[in-house]
Image: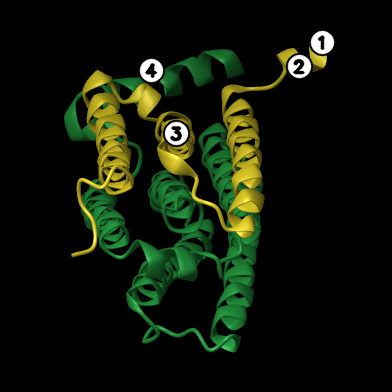
Chain colours: A yellow, B green
Amino acid sequence: MTHFKKIDRLTLSWLVLMGLTAITLLFARHGDAGGSVGIAGAALLLALAVAKGREILLHYLELDQAGPGWRLAMTGWLVLLCGAILLVTAAGALGWIGPH
Amino acid sequence: MADIEMTGLELTRSEERAVGLAALPGNLMMWILIFSELAVFGAAFIGFAIARVLDPAIFAAGQAHLNGTAGALNTMVLVTSGYLAARGVAAGRRGAVAQARRAMLMAAAVGSVFLAVKAMEYSATLGAGLTIDTDSFFTLYFLLTGFHALHVVLGIVILLLVSRSGRDTLVENLETGAAFWHMVDLVWVILYPLVYLIR
């Protein structure tokens, strides 16, 4: 317990990043079996990417100390990019866009 | 006494970082590079997602050849290396120069494992006769992962260079080098699910 309290924020970030990456290993196996992850699977994987990217932005790149403007701009880029990827992927899965 | 000195340093740092571009760690020019890299990779990632939707069969067949476990391993390698680089920056700020330099060298060493894993992946792919010319999936796969791997190479060189900085410039150079390295990390955590896992 006392040992746990000694973990600093940076080390916690590293542990979170390792843990979130371990979750993606489940998809790596599933992927080898050849199936589609579906829209929900894509959403989960991109949510994991956003969570990982946020740890990197706030605690590795130290935007937690850089003020709300930078935090918003950089996490905004992350969320918008992953959101756009999800939107395109979902549009394909739903047949809104596809091969001609 | 030491406490008073530490508090003084902290105050100076947070004053310097209070507003605008000065709020970012390291050299401003590195951040301009980081913004442009994130813009380019962002556009390329959306392009990849659109290309997949337009040719789902080719992409599914191509992705089946990729080793998702190796991709996860490489994510762990990069976030561990990034952690070591961030520890190096923290050590530099504390004035623990030798410790800071050692952390940067370790970050570079762990980073080189990424390249070894990537080389194994490429040799498996190329060994199966799948090249940049095979189809649209493999063209984009090699371009995106290759472009990212070149950034890993450059990042390792930068980490090695900043670890050799003199005492006067050490902290800013460590912050600058680590910022580039964290950007390479950030790009990979999106590239990995996009290219390897989502299909």
Q: Are marks 2 and 1 in contact (CB under 8 Å)?
A: yes
Same chain check for tags 3 and 2: yes
Q: Chain of mark 3?
A: A
Tell me the amino acid under the disc marked 3. Ala
User: Type of residue at label 4?
Assistant: Leu
User: Callout 3 environment at 10 Å: few (<14), some (14 to 19), or many (20+)?
Assistant: few
- Which mark is drawn over residue A1? 1
Determine if residue A52 is in view. Answer: yes
Q: Where is residue B47 shown, x and y percent of the image?
A: 24, 59
Q: Is residue B105 left or right of residue B51?
A: right
CA distance separating discs 2 and 1: 5 Å
Looking at this view, is B58 or A73 the one in front?
B58
What residue is shown at x 41% (from left), y 47% (from top)?
B190
Give whichever of B138, A73 is nearer the camera: B138
CB under 8 Å between discs 3 and 1:
no
- Circle 1 chain: A
A96 on left or right of B166? left
Helix or strand or loop: what does disc 1 sit on? Answer: loop
Mark 1, other Cα within 10 Å: few <14 / some 14–19 / many ≥20? few
Q: Chain of mark 2?
A: A
Instruction: Name the residue that disc number 2 marks.
Output: A4
Residue B148 x/y as whole percent: 41, 64
Local crowd size for mark 4, using a 10 Å CA cut-off: few (<14), some (14–19), many (≥20)? few
Q: CA distance from mark 1 to mark 4?
A: 32 Å
- Type of amino acid at the residue the image marks with label 2: Phe
Hey, which quadrant is residue B145 in on the image?
bottom left
**In percent of the image, x 43 and y 18: which residue is there?**
B8
Tell me whether circle 3 and circle 2 mark residues in contact (CB < 8 Å).
no
